[in-house]
């Protein structure tokens, strides 16, 4: 009987992922037909670059949601991590050290979230809401609510550099880009997705993560360290939010304490659209990547069509509602 239920669950998960893939392909085809500039190498690379930060945050929050939690502090952690990197580099530290400190700041915020949820037994919503305020407040305080500018060019290499970029010089001396190259954030996105997908699918941590989200009490009775698993999930979310802060600030070569507003909503939307259940116990990194590209393509295509940003928010909101509705129907049928 249990095996039959498991098989049915797998079929439903595959169907939900199939719907997400179909939606992704449909969006790509539609925008390619209505906009000449959409299906170009330059624009495809632009979409991938814009999607990379969504993917980082989405992958992190996927782990948290699978355990049955939520992380509302992502946007503020993005800002704080970026500010840490900017202040460290402006103080004379090497860029690599500044980025490492930013990553550690994100991890520390994630660990604090995990400890509040597990040791203080705070609801994830309240714990991460508090961290959202704390991280944002620290970022604004240490910068005086001003951008950290005057950073060296090396600070922007990670966010603006690209692999295999080729240029040619015309007779008049003008330099023309022949191939824009693969942006570094896109390469990092692929590596991060592969690593965390492998962890979720093929390691004990991944199995424990699903077990905790499916039935926390059963997982505890089975001898699993539920608290440790939850803390690790929040650390992953915080660390990847820190990575997002590094990439975001590197792209603009300025650390903005006001950056990352509402990023947590984008991250959660990315995971949910990709099939991660808000009830916990279900979700995949590949699904989250699909969700990230759905939002990325949707925003890029709507921008090319001149659709207002406010209308874009309405459309993305409707997509999120539809994704959650599908998840609820799937649960009801189960």
Image (cartoon, rainbow, N blue to C red):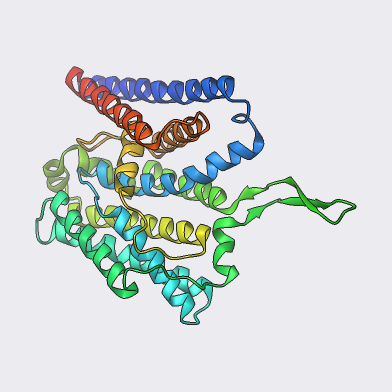
13 vs 52, left or right, is left
Question: Is 310 rendered above or below residue 231?
Answer: above
Quarter in which the N terminus is drawn:
top left
Question: Is 185 rendered above or below residue 98?
Answer: above
Quarter in which the C terminus is drawn:
top left
The quadrant in which residue 332 appears is top left
Residue at 20% over, 46% down: 69
80 vs 192, left or right, is left
Q: Residue furthest left?
A: 121
Question: 180 or 271: nearer the eye?
Answer: 180
Question: Is 155 rendered above or below residue 163?
Answer: below
The quadrant in which residue 219 appears is top left
Q: Residue furthest right?
A: 171
Image coords of residue 286 (percent x, y):
43, 36
Image coords of residue 329 (percent x, y):
22, 20
Question: 129 or 224: nearer the eye?
Answer: 129
Q: Residue furthest top?
A: 333
Image coords of residue 330 (percent x, y):
24, 21
24 vs 206, left or right, is right
Question: 182 or 153: nearer the eye?
Answer: 153
Numbered circles on residues, count:
0
Residue at 60% over, 41% down: 45
Question: Is 205 rendered above or below residue 152?
Answer: above
Image coords of residue 24 (percent x, y):
46, 26
């Amino acid at each position: 009987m249990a095996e039959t239920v498991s098989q049915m669950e797998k079929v439903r998960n595959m169907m939900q992922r199939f719907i997400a893939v179909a939606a992704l392909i449909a969006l790509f085809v539609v925008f390619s037909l209505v906009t000449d500039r959409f299906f170009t190498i330059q624009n495809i690379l632009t979409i991938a670059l814009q999607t990379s930060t969504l993917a980082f945050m989405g992958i992190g929050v996927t782990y948290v949601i699978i355990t049955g939690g939520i992380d509302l502090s992502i946007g503020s952690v993005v800002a704080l991590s970026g500010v840490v990197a900017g202040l460290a580099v402006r103080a004379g530290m090497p860029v690599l050290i500044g980025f490492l400190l930013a990553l550690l700041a994100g991890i520390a915020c994630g660990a604090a979230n995990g400890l509040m949820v597990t040791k203080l037994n705070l609801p994830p919503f309240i714990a991460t809401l508090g961290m959202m305020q704390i991280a944002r407040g620290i970022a604004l305080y240490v910068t005086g609510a001003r951008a950290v500018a005057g950073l060296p060019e090396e600070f922007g290499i990670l966010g603006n550099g690209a692999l295999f970029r080729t240029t040619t010089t015309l007779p008049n001396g003008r330099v023309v880009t022949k191939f824009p190259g693969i942006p570094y954030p896109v390469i990092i996105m692929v590596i991060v997705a592969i690593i965390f997908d492998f962890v979720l699918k093929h390691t004990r941590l991944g199995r424990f993560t699903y077990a905790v989200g499916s039935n926390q009490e059963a997982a505890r009775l089975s001898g699993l360290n539920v608290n440790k698993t939850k803390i690790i999930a929040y650390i992953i979310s915080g660390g990847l939010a820190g990575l997002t802060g590094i990439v975001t600030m590197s792209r603009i070569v300025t650390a903005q304490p006001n950056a990352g507003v509402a990023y947590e909503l984008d991250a959660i939307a990315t995971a949910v659209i990709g099939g991660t259940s808000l009830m916990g116990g279900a979700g995949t990194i590949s699904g989250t990547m699909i969700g990230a590209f759905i939002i990325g393509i949707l925003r890029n295509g709507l921008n090319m069509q001149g659709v207002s940003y406010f209308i874009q928010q309405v459309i993305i909101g409707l997509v999120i509602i539809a994704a959650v509705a599908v998840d609820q129907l799937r649960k009801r049928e189960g």
